[in-house]
Image (cartoon, rainbow, N blue to C red):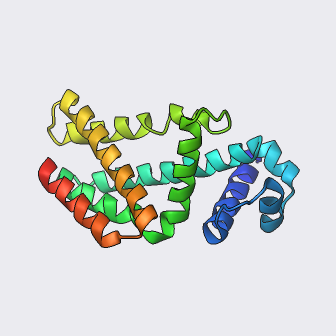
Amino acid sequence: MEGDARAALLTSAIAHLAEHGLGGATLRSIASAIGTSHRMLIYHFGSRDGLLLAIVRSAEEEQRAAMAELAADESASAAELARRMWERVAEPRLHPHERLFFELYGRALQGDPGAAPMLTWVVPAWLDQVTALLVARGLPADEARATARLGLATVRGLLLDLLATGDRAGADAAMELFIRRLT
């Protein structure tokens, strides 16, 4: 039951922040907007940073689930999977989550203790999944791991570029060039 309450609060917080942005949102303002108390958010998430990390983790898990769903199509090449995944992650409705991701990632890299836990899962989870996908499509394991890392860095860099510039056509063209050169 407690997990259901946490999940419901997380879903509400995600919807609220996606619509209104993070800005200067406090735990109290988020709680008020989603119809709960800041104490309930503290109970379930520990702090504002705990809530934000839970939101980013949830968004990342959703993206990895989408990748797994795409990868279930064994007839799709790695290039086609990359194109389909790019279309998904570059979707404008996901931009609020991507902004939050990069904000927290930057804070984690600066050693902020509230965001630092992110560094334990933000890269390894993707590397493991994409490496397995590439191995299943015939790439040797060591090459698959390096290719997964290159792909992750490229996608994150292009997402950051897209958020900074709003140039979807330019980001799409760069991603397509990356895919063609990789394959």
Give how far across and how far down residue 87 sits, in percent: 33, 65
At x 31%, y 56%, the residue is: 70
Left or right position of 130 against 94: left
Query: Is 19 rendered above or below residue 60?
Result: below
Toward the viewer: 67 or 181?
181
Question: Is residue 58 something one can see in this rendering?
Answer: no
Give how far across and how far down residue 104 sits, in percent: 58, 46
At x 29%, y 52%, the residue is: 72
Left or right position of 89 against 105: left
Quarter of image, res 179: bottom left
Give how far across and how far down residue 17 sits, in percent: 66, 64
Left or right position of 83 against 15: left
At x 43%, y 37%, the residue is: 123
Query: Is 167 rendered above or below residue 55?
Result: below
Figure label count? 0
At x 20%, y 61%, the residue is: 176
Q: What is the residue that sits farthest to the top in this orientation?
A: 142
Left or right position of 178 against 94: left
Question: Is residue 47 something one can see in this rendering?
Answer: yes
Quarter of image, res 25: bottom right
Query: Is 35 rendered above or below residue 66?
Result: below
Give how far across and how far down residue 167 sits, in percent: 36, 70
